Image (tube, rainbow, N blue to C red):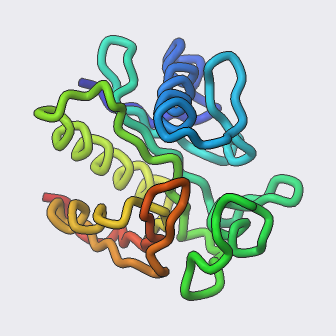
Amino acid sequence: MEVTTLSFENLHQHGPLFANLLRARHRTFIQNNKWDLPQADGMEFDQYDTPASRWVAVHERGEVLAGVRLTPTTHKCGIYSYMIRDAQLGLLQTIPQDLLQFEAPVDPYIWESSRVFVSDLVPAAERLRVQMQLIHEMVVSARNLGATSLLGIIPEHSPRLARRVGLDCQPVGPVLDMGGMKSVCVSISMATKLH
């Protein structure tokens, strides 16, 4: 199993990995979750997949097992910034505006974590190992980018898993029904040491 952090600067070094990551997102979010998201050629993408973002992929023999996108909260592209802030500002119809207990930050030390997934093709016996690899690389990448914390929307019970592996993951909003899933906005400190 390998873990790679992709950027527009290094995509050319990793063959079809980025396209395979977008295909895995398509399978997870469009095929399995039935979310109405932009797609082309079997790949899911949105307005936040820009050169400012980074993508962490856990992969094995060309198959993407898990992934996450990291976006700086300072980024702006047209009317969009990052998903949580744009939802709070009422720019997104599919995410409630009241997802966060405070004004969404614009801060060079805070990045957003979004489009987190583990493929349904990962056997149950391997899921924890894949999740651990994804979390570890997400933290390493975020720290390398200068982040001291991440904001993200995750399934309601995921903060318990995060705490089990040593992440300081705190809910910062109400539990919301988003796309048929109970989710919560969280803040993850990059100061803690992973187990």
Task: Compare residues 100 and 82 and report the one nearer the observer.
Answer: 100
Is 61 drawn above or below residue 185 in the view shown? above
Residue 40 is left or right of residue 5, and the answer is right
Residue ID at (68%, 60%): 82
Residue 174: image location, x then y, percent: 47, 80
Is 160 drawn above or below residue 27 in the view shown? below
Residue 64: image location, x then y, percent: 39, 24
Residue 175 is left or right of residue 103, and the answer is left
Instruction: Give the farthest residue toward the front.
Output: 180
Instruction: Give the farthest residue toward the bottom.
Output: 102
Task: Compare residues 171 and 120 and report the one nearer the observer.
Answer: 120
Residue 19: image location, x then y, percent: 57, 20
Residue 85: image location, x then y, percent: 68, 70
Task: Compare residues 157 and 135 and report the one nearer the observer.
Answer: 157
Residue 8 is left or right of residue 162, and the answer is right
Residue ID at (37%, 17%): 63
Tally the numbered discs: 0
Looking at the rendered image, the quarter that the N terminus falls into is: top left
Residue ID at (16%, 33%): 126
Residue 54 is left or right of residue 77, and the answer is left
